[in-house]
Amino acid sequence: MPPPATTPVFRKTTETFEAGAKTLPQRYFTSPEVLAAEQEGIFSTHWMLVGHQSQIAQAGDYFVQEVAGESLIIARDQTSVRAFYNVCRHRGTRLCEDRSGHSTTIQCPYHAWTYALDGRLVGAPHMTGEAVPGFDKADYSLHAVSFGLWEGFIFVNLGDAPASLEQWFAPLQGKFSHWNLPRLRSAHRIEYDVRANWKLIFENYSECYHCPGVHPMLSKVSPYDSAENDLTEGPFLGGFMKITKGASLTMTGEACARPVGDGHKGEEEGEDAEDFERVFYYSIFPNMLLSLHPDYVMVHQLWPQSPDRTLISCDWFFHPEAAEQSNFKPEDAVAFWDTTNKQDWHVCELSQQGIASRAYQPGPYSSRESIPAAWDREYLRRMADL
């Protein structure tokens, strides 16, 4: 049975550091062959984050996302979210050119074949009746993609008959209900083009060993040595770090919005008060970083482009009623993390440059890097399955 919706699941664990753990060999960060294997065996077969349901809140809303080299249409019809390959069933033309939009139908720009938002072919000029004997529109619906919703986030899977999204996320059932994730709304998005391998982004996110030197602003409000992790093995990794009492991870150090969770209690009201002094960080294999603050949630999507280049989309989510209150200042959180993100991307790019050298050899992880080491183990397990 999942825990009550207003109670966050967090169990402090005693981590065991794996002595002798080292960083990955060079080829995993520089080889086009390795990236091709990742695209085919990981990004084409695992559940991939593509967005949040609030992006397509109304029937007719859609957006386009590339996954493992495939362009996909994510749309909402009158009843639910849908996902399709962005390919016309006539002569294969790409259907949607805009990254997002609103429409009652999807029409091919070439020969005007027209599809309903549930994928059915509803219009095909000069194809029906005696024009093309035996032609049946029912045979030419858009090719669907497996999709699902988890805590309001939209995931797709290009694999053949994949295990359900519910099965994949079963170990996290109820864990994040405290933050009202399905109801949140993105107030801002920044897209970054980082000259580093996607795995370096995950490894960097998963430790704060680097924080004193790289993130002086962050270290002032969240002590780098305060990390406690409750997910320490497998595809879901992370835990929390403390926030200095009375502070928030913003440029001013003050809360920038109402709490995201309706279940939060005031400081004087008991158990949940300690969550006002914590920020939770979780990596969700293979392309999601989930950062949960008391007053906002930050989500990164990672999209590898080459062995040394990763596109990252970063969204800042807030309570749907936050904008109605006078203390709503999303730019305070956005500016804080935009600065911090850019510091991270810079050191990841420096790592990429050094790893590409003939002098590079795998180095030992410190005891403060147990989560990056665990992430490497999970990655290697996935690669071994290919």
Image (spheres, grey):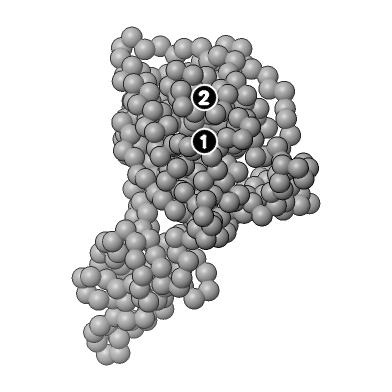
User: Above or below — where is 214 with respect to 175?
Assistant: above
In this rendered view, identify the residue nearer to me: 22 or 338.
338
Residue 163 is situated, as x and y percent measured from the top left of the image, at 59, 51
- Residue 209 lies, with reference to residue 171, above or below; the image says above
Which amino acid does the dot numbered 2 rest on? Ser
> Is 334 displayed left or right of 306 in the figure?
right
What residue do we see at 50% from left, 52% from top? 328
165 or 97, nearer to the observer: 97
Give neighbour class at mark 2: few <14, some 14-19, many 20+ (Cα, 10 Å): some
Q: How crowded is mark 1: few (under 14 residues within 10 Å), some or many (20 or more)?
A: some
Q: Is residue 276 above or below residue 351?
A: below
Q: Mark 2 points at which residue?
A: 219
* Whole-percent x, y for residue 165 in the image: 58, 53
Residue situated in front as seen by the camera: 171 or 277: 277
- Residue 237 x, y percent position in the rendering: 59, 34
- The one nearer the camera, 366 or 10, is 10
Residue 122 seen from this side: yes
Residue 170 is tagged as: none
- Identify which residue is drawn at 32% across, 81% down: 123
Q: In which quarter of the image is residue 197?
A: top left
Query: Which residue type does callout 1 highlight?
Result: Gly
Query: Can residue 39 be seen by looking at this rendering?
Result: no
